[in-house]
Image: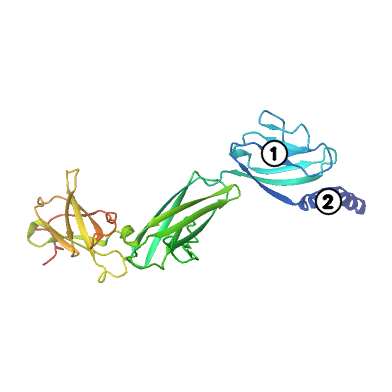
Amino acid sequence: MIRTLTLTAILLLPSYEFLESKATVPVTHEFGHLGAEMTLRCNTPSPYVEWRFNGRKVEDSDDVYSNGSRHLTLAEVKRHQSGKYTCHHPHSDETLALIELQLGLPPEKLHVQCWSSSYPEKINCTWDLEPRTAVHTTFLTTYRLGLMGPKAPQHCTQHELNPNSCVISNFRMFEEFPYLLNVTAINPLGSITQLYYFFAENIIRPDPPVNVRIHSLCWESRKLYVRWKPPHSWPYPEIFPLKYKVRYRKTGSKSYTTVGPYEQTSLVLTGIRPGSAVYVQVSAHDITDLGHSSEWSDVVVGRPWTPYDLQCFHR
């Protein structure tokens, strides 16, 4: 029994030592440009090594070749070639190097846009990076007032949950010069900077109105009462009021009729065919016509009053 245990321990020992040896090999992180040629190097005095990709031996081909040397060349690298490359001593199988290869693209195009749905409290900015880089990319975001603004740009605060956006909460209204947002995308393969100029008042764009409701009017078979509230994100509707447009479509019609703008938050639609369904949406705009209109609210549906309607609205 003692001999059996001793023999088992001896048989397990080389495997354990091999794992220990592999674990101590430092990992080298390398990045490659998709479509370009990439050469990996095994830092060893031995002239011949064996290369493996994700644990499997690399065979020479038109796209991959080493001829057993310390240099492994990948021609016109593709996404599926990202992974772990190791080189080994051809006789002892010792792991000589471990390379973590990530393939992707440098930042190429940034599309930036800013708008204020909470004027005058904050400005939201977002950007899209095209094409996707496939490697981790970080963004530096600063802004300043014109080219003659403060020497030290201020930071546009980025969202942790959405790295492709930031918020400007320290700006002044009705400035003579535009604000300048600077977005720089950086990854191990390169960087790109995009500048975006804007006047705060030109990018006002409220969110859609909320709590849009349609009510039938008691004893009115051809009318509907529509009401709504300003968007919750609009901070001071009493100081910076909004105006509204209403569009509606009757059953069987493919086109909308648009009415307004109105400063009030309710409206009576007339000329409705008795018993027909009406589909209604509401849009908001700054009352001074600055900036842009909001998107349309969600569609709500209503029908005029009938003698069986017990929940009609009394004006």
Q: To which quarter of the image does residue 60 belong?
A: top right
**Color style of the picture:** rainbow
Coordinates of residue 299 in the picture (x, y in percent): 25, 53
Q: Splitting the image into 4 quarters, where does residue 179 fall?
A: bottom left
For the point 26% across and 65% down, which residue is it?
Answer: 230
Quadrant occupied by the C terminus = bottom left
**Within-10-Å neighbours for mark 1: few <14, some 14–19, many 20+:** few
Mark 2, secondary structure of its residue: helix
Residue that numbered label 2 is attached to: 17
The image position of residue 64, as x and y in percent, is 68, 33
Q: Horizontally, is 277 left or right of 151 in the view? A: left
Q: Which residue is mark 1?
A: 39
- Assess whether mark 1 and mark 2 are in contact (beta carbons under 8 angstroms): no
Q: Is residue 210 placed above or below 248 in the rendered structure?
A: below
Could you say where residue 28 lies in the image, as x and y percent from the top left? 71, 49
Outermost top residue: 62
Mark 1 belongs to which amino acid?
Answer: Thr
Q: Is residue 214 left or right of residue 157?
A: left
